[in-house]
Amino acid sequence: MTDVVIRPLVAGEEALFDSMPDPLPQLRQISYADGIAGGGYRPERTWIALRAGRVVARAAWLHLPGAVGAPWLERFDLAAEPAVGAALLRAAHEALGGPLAYHAALPAYWRRRPEVLAVVEAPMAAARLAGLVERGERLRCTWAGAPLPATSGRYTVRPAADREEINALVARIVEPDVLTGRETARAVAGVDLATDPLAWLTGPPADWRVALDEGRPVGLAGTAGDACYPLLAYLGLLDGAARDELLVAAVRVLAEGGAREVVADVDGHRVGVLADLERTGFRQVRARVIFEPVG
């Protein structure tokens, strides 16, 4: 902590944030300059730690224009001991009105990669020192044109009839398997994608797919072709065996609409869901560990 200066950026210092080399350049994420231009990043929500005039820690909280929820820590890089990072977070939290969530973006399979662990262990330790607690992990997977597998043919899959049918099925699904963009929907619009997806997803009901077993609905999948990426936004089951058919049908909706890539987010502990995504041609591209304030 000797001779460390911790402070927010001021307008015009954007290049100072980028003077710190990107420790994980393989991650696909919004650049700081683009975030400033779009209004999601602001200098007063961006903090740095300087040692001998060099940036050794940087943190940027994201708050999208018009968002109703609190900002979250989107970028946090640390080239110093965890105590420096923790001091930066504590100072920023005090200025920002209290501890805020941290979404730690990581490459896929990061626990198996020593070179990645060497980068991410310090900022994650700093988050814990600053009073944040790990609450789970979300995995981002993408389908990028892989041939779709054949399905069993046991289930019939058809377009959803209307919003009423979608809402009725959502109300019966206790825990959806796939919720893509759940954190963004909550932070921007205060919407729980698990219980009210149509409050966030604006596409036509006919882009949703219902799986039927002898005429009885057993699963539901929702796509969003007009989001930042084509999304498999929602997938939930009343009968777990229907997942493969729904995945293939949902990807086909997007591919026939011109999508070359489809994004899906799933909780890291959902091993069976991940296996079915991989059988459909999805591959893990990123992880996101969620840290939240205690309480």
Image (cartoon, rainbow, N blue to C red):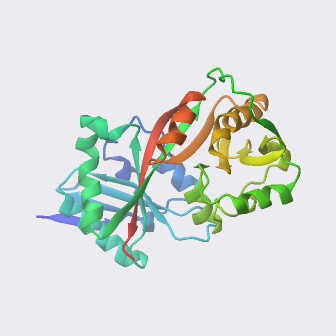
Outermost residue on the left side: it is 2
Instruction: Residue 79: give x, y in percent of width and height.
Output: 23, 50
Total numbered labels placed on residues in the image: 0
The picture quadrant where one finds residue 164 is bottom right
* Side of 148 relative to 52 (left or right): right
Nearest the eye: 209 or 205:
209
Instruction: Residue 294: give x, y in percent of width and height.
Output: 36, 74
- The residue lying at 31 percent from left, 60 percent from top is 48
Outermost residue on the front side: it is 214
Nearest the eye: 207 or 154:
154
- The residue lying at 41 percent from left, 37 percent from top is 108
Instruction: Residue 154: give x, y in percent of width and height.
Output: 74, 32
In this view of the protein, can residue 56 be seen by the observer? no
* Side of 103 relative to 201 (left or right): left
Q: Is residue 228 above or below residue 80?
A: above
The picture quadrant where one finds residue 10 is bottom left
* Side of 207 relative to 6 (left or right): right
Q: Is residue 114 above or below residue 294?
A: above
- The residue lying at 24 percent from left, 58 percent from top is 125
The quadrant in which the C terminus is found is: bottom left
In this view of the protein, can residue 239 be seen by the observer? yes
- The residue lying at 28 percent from left, 69 percent from top is 130
Instruction: Residue 50: give x, y in percent of width and height.
Output: 23, 59
The quadrant in which the N terminus is found is: bottom left
Nearest the eye: 198 or 261:
198
* Side of 243 relative to 204 (left or right): left
Outermost residue on the top side: it is 147
